[in-house]
Image (tube, rainbow, N blue to C red):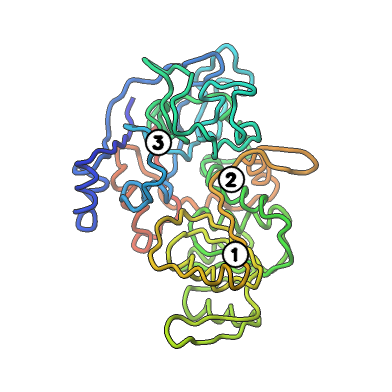
Amino acid sequence: MKAVTFNVTIPSYVVGKTLGKLTEAAVFGGLSGVRFEELAEPELPGDRWVKLEVILAGICGSDIGNLTLKSSPAMEPFGSFPAVLGHEILARVVETGPGVTRVEVGQRVAVDPGVSCVVRGHQGSEQCVSCIEGLPSTCTRAGDEGKTIIGAGPIQRGMTIGYHASLPGGWGERMIAHESQLFPVSDAINDRSASLIEPLAVGMHAALQSRPLGEGPALVLGSGPIALGVIWALRATGYNGELVAQVRREHEADLARALGASSVISPGDEARDAMVATGANAYMPIVGDEVYAGGGFPLIFDCVGSGQTVKQALRYATVRGRIVLLGCAAEIPKLDLTPVWANELRIQGYQCYGEEAWRNGTEHTFKITHDLLIETGAPVERLVTHIYPLRQYQEALSTAANRRKTGSIKVLLDPRS
């Protein structure tokens, strides 16, 4: 099968760090650790495993951050390489093990890329606390080999498909998954919308875990699929308060409104005006940036994770306000944390999904997201701005990495083309 792989080596790291700002060849092309290769198809390692044909797979902001070597090295021990990339996956079942009951051959499925204790081969009380609670994205065994035998040896370390040497991701023609990772997709959802279930589930998890949401106003920073997904998820789960979206480009503003934003602002003067409109008073210290007292936003979702947005969230939060970090904020130099203690702020980070309290029971975030897409009829397929054949992965990565130039929101790869 054909696949796009990524390998972390010292030479590719040095080249990427030294030349990455000069040429994309150092991070996506021939000088990088990314390759378009012919690989052997993976075989089923057990009775409850499934072989999949990939229909569509997304390019995530975290993929761009990792390939451009801008992400923190803190997560490196929880991946294994070389790996077939791609963790946002819509696929079709082509083969099932004899113990599979959850899906059938021919079904479309959304793939939860999280690698749980069950996937690693640990059952019952052998599972870690996170996996027992249905939250495998924080599995404490992510840095260790497991019991499951895949190919010639035990399943390698790794917290997610796409950065896992044993489990090929969606940037390839075929892959395998444990049946616990698969969620059937209704014919009522088109391929483009279904390919977004994984990133939309990130926003859904944050919205559900942030309940009670209060009366607002709420502020969402960012204009990518996660931020737009948060806007939709807040409305889909019943938030009726004022919802302010901060985006940079007009087509993103249109989408934010279509998905439920009450108003849309741009970073800078418009954002400041919105802050003042909440009743905040502005003060200028002898040195440094403007600070505020009174007013503010009781609930802020930072879906960017840059130094600029984290700083803004800290200053724009009301006293005892809540900040939800969804952007992959990493090493931020000279970040002033004074507002955290001065205003008694609460900060919570989320990265994935799992079992949620929902409608008098429990349900996985993927299932909730799937069902609410049907119930709301939201035009989420408009988030998909570009689709490329797998062989054009370099162009696809460039399109995703250069949003200001290309206008991209979600870029997909189609291994069938």
Sequence-wise, the earlier of marks 3 and 2 is 3
- State the residue at coordinates (30%, 42%): 392
Rendered image: mark on residue 79 = 3
Residue 64, how many percent across, how many down? 36, 50
For the residues bearing labels 2 and 1, Cβ distance under 8 angstroms? no
Q: Residue at x 59, y 31 (%)?
A: 128
Disc number for residue 197:
none
Which picture quadrant has residue 415?
top left
Residue 36 appears at what percent x and percent y? Answer: 27, 34
Regarding residue 417, the answer to whether it shows in the image is no
Picture disc at residue 201? 2
Q: Nearer the viewer, mark 1 or mark 3?
A: 3
The image position of residue 234, as x and y in percent, is 66, 57
Look at 37% across and 29% down and name the residue there: 165
Q: Neighbour class for label 2 at 10 Å: few (<14), some, many (≥20)? A: many
Alpha carbon separation for disc pair 3 and 2: 22 Å
- 272 vs 122: above or below: below
Residue 191 appears anywhere in the view: yes
* Crowd tier of the residue under label 3, counting other residues whose Cα lies within 10 Å: few below 14, some 14–19, many 20 or above: many
Q: Which mark is residue 300?
A: 1
